[in-house]
Amino acid sequence: MKRSHLRFFLPALILMALFCLVLPGCTDQNVDTPPVNEEPPKPPSEGLEFMYYGVGGDGYAVSGIGTCTDTNIVIPSTYKGLPVKAIRELAFSYCNTIETVTLPDTIQYIGTAFVGCSSLRSINLPQSLTDIDARAFAECESLESIEIPSGVTVIRGGTFYTCRKLKSVTLHDGITTIEDGAFENCQSLESIRIPGKVTVIPKVAFAYCENLKSVTLPEGLTHIDYQAFYTCDSLQTVNFPSTLQSIGELAFEECTSLDPVVLPESLTTVGRRAFNACQSATALTIPSGLTSIGGAAFCGWSSLKQLTLPATVGTVVYGMFQGCIELEQVTIADGITSIDDYAFYACKALKSITIPKSVTHIGEFALGCASLDDIYYAGSKAEWNSIELEPRWNDATSAQSNSFTVHCIDGDISIDIY
């Protein structure tokens, strides 16, 4: 072919070859191309220590960090031809350089293995996992989120104690038990949904979770124990289920943002200082079934303005509404027999109170209210005078007047303020 013809056809041949490369039929369709964003599996960490682990069949457990210096720990799925099934107690405790841990889908048990790993940010919990020991991740102060796998049914005591940055927790519906202090002092946790099979919120389970804003409790829950949500001062909403029977001592003390507080009719017991210093709560309805109330149970509700107490309460106990400084009006139902010491002490906005003739005893400082002007008593003057009045029953600091009036059905009685 002449050289001039080559100059004519050569550009066309090049264009045809390029066009063929982009046609589907011109490429090898059997060639596997990895996804663009998929990272290759990380090789297992070297230098870890292992020991024989025979629970549920032959296998091995990681027993220590050994000579490994990795900050991103990768646990192998096998060791010496057998599955790696567990992370033993104290295996990585207080290893402050570890930042991430990758577990294989052979792991069934985690002991108190990662306590004090203050730099640990993330760890995957595989679906093979069935048991996490108490305090397994306690003081992992950098851990940000955790998802409990479906095989785990118990969150043991102190499992996530002082995980200060733990913000997200996913609890599956198969969980039946949460033990004492499981999430105590998780200061970044903002919300929690309790699974439906859990019947008890135990002692200090979420105490000191200072950023916890909402809690969802399931129907079927019966008890909230001692200090369960103590000093959760950002907590705004809690749905109390219709199955709830008791709220323990100090359970919601100093939950200063909690409002409203709607207690169910099923509730029979509220412990001492259970809702002490809930400063934002504006309303309270006492259920008719509530028959046992501990001292200072609703003390320090500085936003509460009105209150009606049903007869089933029986006794307005020690300090029950002490320091409710905005409380203006109180009605006590017929059937209540005693207003105990300090019951309404320092309710400085309280101007009037209605007292039934069933009341036979008023304790020390019980009505020590600086603004109290009127007591509306449902009995006669003689019946009022038969009430056992403890010394200084109406003693009020900085009283605005020297006396108030008891309005009886047959006339008024003027009472001097101590």
Image: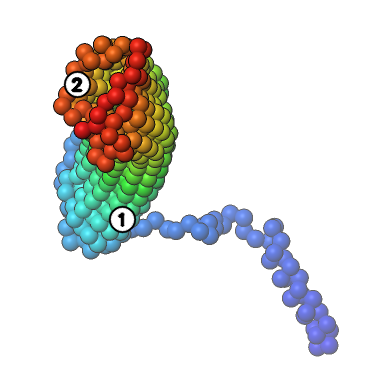
Name the residue rendered at 23%, 47% in the picture: 138
Name the residue rendered at 29%, 13% in the picture: 381
State left or right for residue 389 relative to residue 177.
left
Image quarter of the C terminus: top left
Which picture quadrant has residue 111? top left
Can residue 248 be seen? no
Residue 79 at what x, y percent from top left? 24, 49
In the rendered view, tell whether residue 72 sits above or below residue 276. Answer: below
State which mark lies toward you, 1 or 2.
2
Decide: few, some or many residues near mark 2? Use Cα within 10 Å; few <14, some 14-19, many ≥20: some
Q: Amino acid at mark 1?
A: Ser
Residue 395 at what x, y percent from top left? 22, 33
Name the residue rendered at 44%, 58% in the picture: 39
Q: Amino acid at mark 2?
A: Leu
Residue 173 at what x, y percent from top left? 39, 30
| Residue position marked by numbered label 1 in the rendering | 142
Which picture quadrant has residue 194? top left
Image colouring: rainbow
Q: How many marks?
A: 2
In the rendered view, tell whether residue 226 sits above or below residue 13. Answer: above
| Residue position marked by numbered label 2 in the rendering | 389
Residue 132 at what x, y percent from top left? 25, 39
Query: Closer to the camera, 373 or 2?
Result: 373
Q: Earlier in the sequence, mark 1 or mark 2?
A: 1
Q: Label 1's element?
A: loop
Decide: few, some or many residues near mark 1? Use Cα within 10 Å; few <14, some 14-19, many ≥20: some
- The mark found on residue 153 in the picture is none
Can residue 364 be seen? yes
